[in-house]
Image: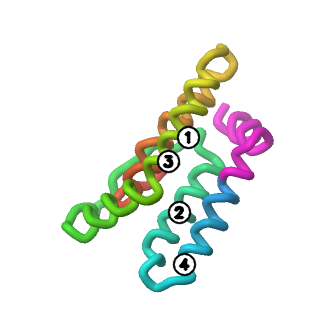
Amino acid sequence: MSCIGNVIWLIFGGFLSGLGYIVGGLLTCLTIIGIPFGVQAMKLGVATMAPFGLEVQTTPESGGCLQTGFNVGWAIFFGWEIALSHVIHGLILAITIIGIPFAMQHFKLAPLALFPFGKELR
């Protein structure tokens, strides 16, 4: 099921969404200060390409004030808009029975988009 879900996800917007994350991450990496944020954006792009069959997990090296500061900065500047778009798309998709599995993937990606440092999809 996860293979079919990922193929349908890619065809109906997942590829463009993931590509947007990756291009945004590459542009953010043009500045030295933006490199950690760009890496997280590219990680989100790869996760957005194929979310079915993956779970959000905390990385073993998570924690620390630097990571917390990066998460707060990300949430203020980028994350809340991305997370809000995932929630809105999830609510729209949850209207139909066929869209519920895709809505669940959006709801899974929303917390990762809000605080990406220290988390990944595995």
Residue type, label 4: Cys
- As shown in the figure, which amino acid type bears the numbered disc 2? Ala
Q: Secondary structure at mark 3?
A: helix
Q: Nearer the viewer, mark 2 or mark 3?
A: 3
Q: Which residue is mark 3?
A: 81
Does the magenta run of residues contain 91? no
Which secondary structure is most common in the magenta stretch? helix
- Tag 2 residue: 41
What is the span of residues highlighted in magenta in the rendered image?
1-17
Decide which of 119, 122 is in the foreground and name it: 119
The residue indicated by pointer 1 is: 85
Give the amino acid at mark 1.
Ser
> In terms of sequence position, does the residue under pointer 4 or pointer 1 come before the other?
4
Q: Residue at x 40, y 60 (%)?
A: 74
- Whether the magenta-drawn stretch holds residue 5 is answered as yes
Left or right side of 27 for 11: right
Mark sitting earlier along the chain (2/1): 2
Check whether the beta carbons of the residues at disc 2 and disc 1 lie within 8 A of each other. no
Marks 1 and 3 close (CB-CB < 8 Å):
yes
Q: Earlier along the polypeptide chain: callout 4 or callout 2?
A: 4
Residue 55 is situated, as x and y percent measured from the top left of the image, at: 46, 43
Q: How many marks?
A: 4
- Structural distance between the alpha carbons of marks 2 and 1: 15 Å
Residue 11 screen position, x and y as percent: 80, 42
User: From mark 4 to mark 2, how far is it between C-alphas?
Assistant: 10 Å
- Identity, as a three-letter code, of the amino acid under mark 3: Glu
Q: CA distance from mark 4 to mark 1?
A: 23 Å
Real-space Cα separation, disc 2 to disc 3, in angstroms: 13 Å
Marks 4/3: CA–CA distance = 20 Å
Label 4 with label 3: CB-CB less than 8 Å: no
Mark 4 or 3, nearer chain start: 4
